[in-house]
Amino acid sequence: MCAMAEASDAHGLLEPGQIIRPMLKKADVPALVAKVYGLSVVSVKELNSYDDKNYLIQVQSKINNTHMTDLCPHGYVVKVTNSLDSKNTNLIAAQNEMMLFLHSRGINVPKPEKNVHGTYMMREKLKVDMDDFVKNNTDECPSGEYMVRMLTFVPGKILHQVKYTSQLFFECGELAAKMDNELMEFNNEHLKGRKLIWMLENTPDLTKFIFAVRDESRYKMITEILDAWNQRVVPLLPTLDRGMIHGDFNEQNIIVDATAPEHPDEYHVSAIIDFGDIQESCYVFEVAITIMYLMIEVDEMPPNDAGGHVLAGYLKHRALSEVEWSVLRECVAARFAQSLVMGAYSYEQDPGNEYLLTTARRGWDVLATFWSAPKEQVLARWREIIRSYEK
């Protein structure tokens, strides 16, 4: 099965059976950082990641890298990209360029650092973790070549770790819109042809992975959403406003901070991280993705209401056309379908990686409630919430 990891299709889309996640031990990170960045690591912590490996490191003050003049006081994230995306140098370069662009525009994002060779990335042949081969029943080792980068660590908590509020949802919408507005001036030709299973335009490709959904009622709901996508969204895709988007604006990638010392439990949205899914796509997808992920674990309001608060913040900085409004509910449902189907499939490939089931814990029930509500009712409620911010 492991040999299949080398055979990506012509479009770079994940195919059933591929194992693309780097098989790297935490203990090997200090030597990697010393070699590529000229820094001495004093601590390593592995972070959650879907297809890549990410490590938070702290380093000593001595710098053996002529391309770094000072150190980030909060540490760094070493990113080891999955084998599929590691082959696409142009894609990773585009991620770096987008982060540097947004950083220069005042959007709080991780900033790529140059390695000892003066570049923002380096492909390295890494020592692999043989325990993972046994766990995945693999019978042949991959090449072990992965792209390595180092980004400044953005301090704060991820949104998932704090109590959700309508104000935080509003601020999430604001940040997504501000970012989209800035990205209207960002152009990268290599992103325009990107194909990724997580792109909403590739929703029909879920048919390849839907076998992993074993429950009959859930399977039926996903097929209904796919049918609705094909019938209602696909014909309108050419009419939707397009540009560069983040593509994964979720509760694990949104950073919040307590800005007032006198109110340590009052958080505000401060940053967005993880640019692995950037793409040229429809702007309405950005806000739909944001809405979907914020619906999953909210207890402070009915999940269906979350979209209204996100939209109120988003619309403060970017308007939605009537065509975008007309497909918004289907876009939210399609992202649910992507996350739930791919989560089920990926867990079959990597059993025990509970991070892959983050959406599934409540996502199926939330989606069922959302999808069963009449479309007109959902949109009317969202508009009602938006109007409440205008008073």
Image (tube, grey):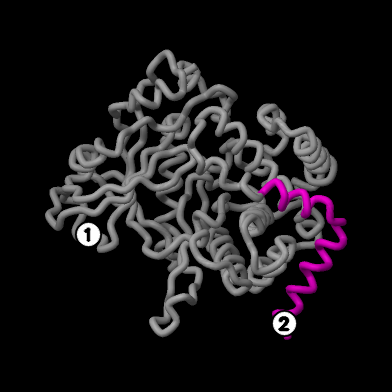
Q: Amino acid at mark 1?
A: Leu
Q: Is residue 283 visible?
A: no
The stretch in magenta equals 363-391
- Give the residue furthest to the top: 139
Q: If the image is split into quadrants, where does the C terminus sit?
A: bottom right
Question: What residue lies at 39% left-to-right and 20% top-to-bottom?
Answer: 142
Image coordinates for residue 57, horizontal then vertical, percent: 27, 51
Predominant secondary structure, magenta span: helix
The residue wearing badge 1 is 71
Number of on-image labels: 2
Measured in 3D between alpha carbons, the distance from the residue under mark 1 to the one under mark 2, in whole angstroms, is: 44 Å
Question: What residue lies at 70% left-to-right and 61% top-to-bottom?
Answer: 303
Question: What residue lies at 39% left-to-right and 32% top-to-bottom?
Answer: 22
Is residue 152 shown above or below 137? below
Compared across the picture, whether 163 is left or right of 334 comes to left
| Magenta residue check for 160 | no
Compared across the picture, whether 233 is left or right of 116 comes to right
> Which of the two discs, 1 and 2, labels the residue nearer the N terminus?
1
The residue wearing badge 2 is 390
Compared across the picture, whether 34 is left or right of 359 comes to left
Q: Are marks 1 and 2 in contact (CB under 8 Å)?
A: no
Is residue 145 shown above or below 110? above
Q: Is residue 164 visible?
A: yes
Image coordinates for residue 316, horizontal then vertical, percent: 65, 74
Is residue 301 shown above or below 142? below
Label 2 crowding class (10 Å Cα cut-off): few <14, some 14-19, many 20+?
Answer: few
| Magenta residue check for 378 | yes
Q: Which mark is residue 338?
A: none
Question: What residue lies at 63% left-to-right and 44% top-to-bottom?
Answer: 360
Label 1 crowding class (10 Å Cα cut-off): few <14, some 14-19, many 20+?
Answer: some
Task: Tell me which corner region of the image, top left, top right, bottom left or bottom right, holds residue 23.
Answer: top left
